[in-house]
Image (cartoon, coloured by chain):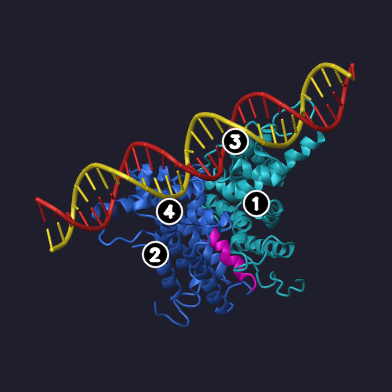
Chain colours: A cyan, B blue, C yellow, D red
Amino acid sequence: MSQAVIERERRTEAGEQTIQRVLDAAEERFAGEGFSGTSLRDIARDAGIRAPSLYNHFENKEALYAAVLERAFGPVLEILERFLSRGPDAYETPAMATDMLAVLADRPNRARLLLHEALSGNRHRNELLATWIERLFGSGLRAMGNSPGRHPWSKEELPLLLLAMNNVIAGYVAVAPAFEGMLVRDPLSPAALRRQERFLAKLWTLLWDEAPERRDSSERGRGTK
Amino acid sequence: MSQAVIERERRTEAGEQTIQRVLDAAEERFAGEGFSGTSLRDIARDAGIRAPSLYNHFENKEALYAAVLERAFGPVLEILERFLSRGPDAYETPAMATDMLAVLADRPNRARLLLHEALSGNRHRNELLATWIERLFGSGLRAMGNSPGRHPWSKEELPLLLLAMNNVIAGYVAVAPAFEGMLVRDPLSPAALRRQERFLAKLWTLLWDEAPERRDSSERGRGTK
DNA sequence: GTTGCTAACGAACGATAGTTCGTATGAGCC
DNA sequence: GGCTCATACGAACTATCGTTCGTTAGCAAC
């Protein structure tokens, strides 16, 4: 169980379910309106309880927020480690992009929470988020820097490329729903995600292959819809 | 003067200056903490006045927020029109990317405000923002759709590409400062912006040119600008 | 049955939110 | 000099905020 949750000697199953419902509601609210824009009474109402009952499970609002981040980004850290263990040029393969898209799209609130923290200048200085970002970017940079020069990018450009890749993937998950219908309809539906997945794979080959042969790569016939 | 500002028969110069100070302070606060995370007393304090005095210039908090968006995105609309008047393939030229970067970096709060609205699902349904996005994406899509297939992108992929491009540019301005020192140090400094500008130009040629050799100065179609 | 803990609640606290009101000051115009 | 209006303020309103407290119902262990 999360560290940010109040420890109990014996926890009821009903209490366990309440915690999960509260975390679900809080994650959705925090992802949409940010920390200060979310009220505990709203979270409690969404979870089917009253605000004071929240204090049976979380010390305060900050602890609840930390628990949300912990649940959201903790599992991703393991996935990230698996990514990085693939080898020094893992970032250059399209699988890196599509897998990351799958991880974020599986729980879009992750990307939204991350963006909220970025916009506020990481005001809460969450430890988990910091290590997550350090892994994602720090390890990524180190891996990319050791990669041989099959790609057209200089060592100076790699950080910018890493940031751009992140913004493309996370931006699609977090921002596209706001432009619903204008660019993509129902961006998080399985069909739309498959489309974005193919798009990312194509993007990756364009960005990482120095001498590409693009004539054959694009399968124009999209039979499934 | 903005529509969201209370109309006066004769406005004092001191009042005019106050309005600008309030808009500056409000823009910064809204960009960082969002609408509901920002208090009028904070804005007033930053502007050197007290909260009730705000109501001499703005009807309420929503109107102040609208005025901030108006001042932030109004001028961009004109710039956008100039972009689109460059021709049907304006989006494919690196100048489109670098100019857009310059516009956003000139006032980074624009990108941050936009992201806040996107994250909250455009909760305020600001008219100016809606028309701005419609112009940016709608007109862009129409222009790109009419462009001949010199680029490797199918008509179905163009919306995804447009969204990705937007996320790369706006993301750099709004998100990079949060990762200060990890990927880019002082991302909005002139030197860093020149670096990002060069990076975007390179990215554009990789994304839009099907063949490695770039077409030179043969501006097809309308060369007026 | 008693005890002890969990988990919920209503009531209420102080703080702060957006907002209103009455008033004072001062600049601009006749 | 008077008049008017723009602008700022303190005080105070209601609503809501995060939070505390006392209490109660229910379950588990002895």
Are the numbered discs 2 and 3 placed on the same chain, yes or no?
no
Q: Position of residue A96 (x, y in %)?
A: 68, 53
Q: Magenta includes B159?
A: yes
1 or 4: mark nearer the eye: 4
Residue at 77% across / 74% down in the picture? A223
Q: Disc 4 versus disc 3: distance between alpha carbons?
A: 30 Å
Kindly report which numbered mark, 4 or 3, lies closer to the viewer in this rendering: 4
Residue at position x 49%, y 52% in the image:
B174
The local crowd at label 3, few if under 14, some if 14 to 19, many if 20 or more residues have their Cα within 10 Å, is: few
- For disc 3, the chain is A
Question: Could you say whether the residue bearing mark 4 is in a helix, strand or loop?
Answer: loop
Q: Is residue B165 above or below residue C20?
A: below
Q: What chain is tagged by disc 1?
A: A
The residue singled out by tag 3 in the image is A62
Q: Which mark is residue B75?
A: 2
Distance of mark 2 from mark 3, alpha carbons? Answer: 39 Å
Cα distance between the residues tagged 4 and 2: 23 Å
Residue B86 relative to residue A38: left or right = left
- The vertical placement of A139 against B56, above or below, is above
Crowd tier of the residue under label 2, counting other residues whose Cα lies within 10 Å: few below 14, some 14–19, many 20 or above: few
Disc 4 with disc 3 on a shared chain: no
Which stretch did the figure color magenta?
B156-167
Q: Which mark is residue A91?
A: 1
Task: Give the quadrant of residue A225.
Answer: bottom right
Q: Are marks 4 and 3 in contact (CB under 8 Å)?
A: no
Q: Which residue is mark 4?
A: B60
How many labels were placed on the picture? 4
Instruction: Give, as a three-letter code, the residue at label 1.
Output: Tyr
Mark 3 residue type: Glu
